Image (tube, helix red, strand yellow):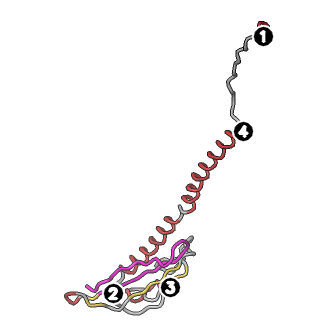
Amino acid sequence: MTAHLKPYAKIHYQRQIGVTLIELILSMLIISIGLLGVLSVINLTVSHSANPVLQHQAIAIAESYLEEILLQAYSGGSTSARADYDDVDDYNGLGDVGVHDQQGNAVAGLSQYNVTVSVSAATALTDGVNAKQITVTVDGPGVSDLRLVGYRTEY
């Protein structure tokens, strides 16, 4: 009776080829989370990349106005047309909607910026030297209330 039983057959396991559905879904989930992180950083960087350019443009405008004013005489006569400004006090209260050159002509491409200028009354410094504080304020896209201050002395 026992002589007719067959010995146990060897079981051969075949190697698995490919991935299971669960492994595939998990790998897709991990890769998508990684890509989401990388793309969000790239998006943040790109969306703020124009801000330094706008800030630099506003500073250049303020420097241009301040240099124009500082090259004028400390005091002089009063004039009403910008092309005739001949002293620092003439610029007090100047308010340009859009950037203008020394002749009062609008500068192309810079109409979205607003520039205001204030000149303080003379302040006595040491050794009897007087100085006026000049403040140039620029507002525009991406820039709010940028102020550049300079001093013109009487010498």
Question: Circle 1 is placed at which residue position?
Answer: 5
Kind of residue at badge 4: Leu
**On the image, which quarter does residue 147 sit in?**
bottom left
Above or below, 104 relative to 38:
below
Spot occupied by residue 46 in the image (x, y as percentages of width and height): 56, 58
Give the spatial CA distance, label 2 vs label 3: 19 Å
Question: Circle 4 is placed at which residue position?
Answer: 21
In this rendering, the label closer to the viewer, 4 or 3: 4
Q: Residues within 10 Å of mark 3 (few under 14, many from 20)?
A: some
> Do labels 4 and 3 touch, CB within 8 Å?
no
Question: Circle 3 is placed at which residue position?
Answer: 95
- 4 and 55: which is toward the camera: 4
Give the spatial CA distance, label 4 vs label 3: 69 Å
- Residue positioned most to the front: 1
Q: Is residue 134 magenta?
A: yes
> Do labels 1 and 3 touch, CB within 8 Å?
no
**What span is colored magenta in the figure?**
131-155
